[in-house]
Amino acid sequence: MSNENPPRAVYRFGTWTLTPDREPDAEPITYAMQCAVCEERSDPVEDLTAAQTWTFRHAGRNPSHHTYREVITRPWRAWMA
């Protein structure tokens, strides 16, 4: 039997802040378009117009697919104030 003290935990309480990551090394914001009919999706790109262009190609190949979703990936940062 050991006489050692059990490990202790240290807790730090504070207020967290969350904001879009605009640091120079932040991941880029990317956009993709997804067909709401068949779930097919464009590749994520940094240019929204390029993502939207995908919908025209997809609709041209699938004339009954009229509904799409915009998928945005935006990096965020959290820190304790």
Image (tube, rainbow, N blue to C red):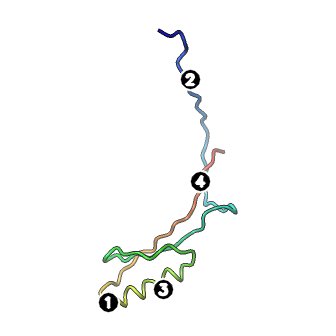
User: Toward the viewer: 37 or 44?
Assistant: 44
Ranked by sequence position, the earlier of labels 1 and 2 is 2
Mark 3 near mark 1, Cβ–Cβ under 8 Å?
Answer: no
Q: In the rendered structure, which amino acid carries the disc numbered 1?
A: Pro
4 or 3: mark nearer the eye = 3
Q: CA distance from mark 4 to mark 3?
A: 32 Å
Q: In the rendered structure, which amino acid carries the disc numbered 3?
A: Thr
Q: Circle 2 is placed at which residue position?
A: 8
Drawn side of residue 72 relative to residue 64, left or right: right
| Mark 1 element type | loop
- Callout 3 environment at 10 Å: few (<14), some (14 to 19), or many (20+)? few
Q: CA distance from mark 4 to mark 2?
A: 29 Å
Residue 72 position, x and y percent, is: 50, 69
Q: Which mark is residue 53?
A: 3
Drawn side of residue 36 relative to residue 72, left or right: left
Q: Is residue 76 above or below residue 17?
A: below
Q: CA distance from mark 4 to mark 1?
A: 42 Å
Q: Which residue is at 49% across, 80% downward?
A: 51
Ranked by sequence position, the earlier of labels 4 and 1 is 4
Q: Circle 4 is placed at which residue position?
A: 18
Q: Quadrant of the C terminus?
A: top right
Mark 4 near mark 1, Cβ–Cβ under 8 Å?
Answer: no
Q: Is residue 12 above or below residue 19?
A: above
Q: Which residue is at 48% across, 82% downward?
A: 52
